């Protein structure tokens, strides 16, 4: 008998889908909402079927229901769906109830200006990291990422920092889930980078992405684990290769990012 399927939620909690309290219909609804990656406005039912592997009748019922509730909007002209204002209200409610963003923002802006790079705060969202805040420090080199953007877990410093902070059992579980979501030919290199980042975190207190996500970008990342160890957020600092040399990351930018994380943790008392 095969292993039960697992669902990976926010902050990396992994839940078996055969758990008696797991409601598959809710999971399916959210899998549909997660199909709308940053920058993609419209998707049809068939697009969603391909991305979720759900039966077409299920997708049709789900998109109709989500539209009725305001989480999707239907365009009769295009015969496709876009995200609705209900999603935005949830996002605003999340941001308003999390002081960590307000506390972190001025510190992130200061570090961005010092490093002439982009400084981000993010959290795990399924198989991706979602950006909660970003501060740009170089007017000539802007990463096209805004709050709400989702980036890969395995190749970004933001995602690797999140993975590096997980207990070994959860780390191994997420590696297994990532492998299933990854093209087979790419997985050995991605896995090696994740494992190396976990070792770098143990050695330096931060980890790296040296062009693996974007060949023009080097980055350093650091996790922030809540005091009760139930949640993980991550900070990163990403910039052009000429600025973000490995030596600077190790001896200057990385330690400054750790200091930023420590300050935010202290000011929030580790509750976020």
Image (cartoon, helix red, strand yellow):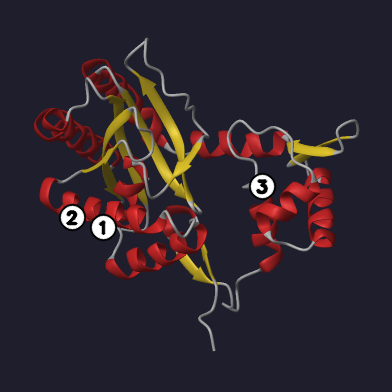
Q: Is residue 150 visible?
A: yes
**Where 133 sits versus 169, above or below?**
above
Q: Which residue is mark 3?
A: 33
Task: First in sequence, mark 1 or 3: give its number.
Answer: 3
Residue 217 sits in which quadrant?
Answer: top left
**Where 165 sits versus 241, above or below?**
below
Left or right position of 177 against 93: left
Q: Nearer the viewer, residue 251 or 134?
A: 251
- Which quarter of the rendered picture does the N terminus lie within? bottom right
Left or right position of 83 against 222: right
Callout 1 touching callout 3 (CB < 8 Å): no
Secondary structure of the residue carrying tag 2 is helix
Residue 81 sits in which quadrant?
Answer: top right
Mark 1 burial class by Cα count in 10 Å: few <14, some 14-19, many 20+: some
Return the x and y of residue 54 as percentages of the image width and height: 73, 62
Q: Which residue is mark 2?
A: 199
Q: Which mark is residue 127?
A: none
Mark 2 burial class by Cα count in 10 Å: few <14, some 14-19, many 20+: some
Return the x and y of residue 168 as percentages of the image width and height: 28, 67
Secondary structure of the residue carrying tag 1 is helix
Q: Which residue is mark 1?
A: 195
Task: First in sequence, mark 3 or 2: give its number.
Answer: 3
Return the x and y of residue 131 as percentages of the image width and height: 45, 36
Return the x and y of residue 251 as percentages of the image width and height: 9, 32
Mark 3 burial class by Cα count in 10 Å: few <14, some 14-19, many 20+: some
Q: State the residue lying farthest toward the left.
A: 251
- Which quarter of the rendered picture does the C terminus lie within? top left
Please name the residue shown 79% across and 56% down the image: 59
């Amino acid at each position: 008998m095969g292993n039960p399927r697992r669902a990976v939620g926010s902050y990396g909690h992994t839940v078996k889908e055969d758990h008696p309290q797991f409601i598959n219909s809710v999971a399916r609804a959210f899998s549909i909402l997660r199909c709308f990656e940053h920058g993609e406005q419209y998707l049809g039912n068939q697009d969603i079927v391909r991305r979720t592997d759900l039966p077409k009748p299920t997708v049709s019922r789900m998109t109709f229901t989500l539209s009725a509730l305001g989480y999707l909007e239907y365009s009769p002209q295009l015969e496709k769906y876009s995200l609705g204002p209900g999603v935005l209200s949830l996002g605003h409610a999340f941001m308003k109830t999390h002081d960590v963003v307000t506390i972190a923002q001025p510190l992130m802006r200061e570090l961005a200006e010092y490093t002439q790079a982009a400084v981000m705060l993010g959290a795990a969202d399924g198989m991706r990291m979602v950006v909660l805040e970003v501060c740009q420090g170089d007017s000539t080199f802007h990463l096209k990422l805004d709050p709400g953007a989702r980036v890969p877990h395995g190749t970004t410093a933001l995602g690797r920092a999140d993975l590096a902070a997980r207990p070994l059992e959860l780390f191994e579980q997420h590696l297994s889930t990532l492998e299933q979501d990854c093209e087979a030919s790419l997985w050995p290199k991605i896995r090696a980078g994740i494992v190396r980042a976990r070792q770098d975190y143990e050695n330096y207190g931060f980890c790296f992405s040296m062009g693996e996500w974007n060949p023009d970008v080097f980055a350093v990342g650091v996790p922030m684990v809540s005091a009760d160890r139930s949640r993980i957020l991550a900070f990163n600092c990403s910039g052009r290769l000429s600025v973000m040399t490995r030596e600077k990351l190790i001896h200057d930018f990385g330690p400054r990012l750790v200091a930023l994380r420590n300050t935010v943790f202290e000011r929030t008392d580790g509750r976020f």
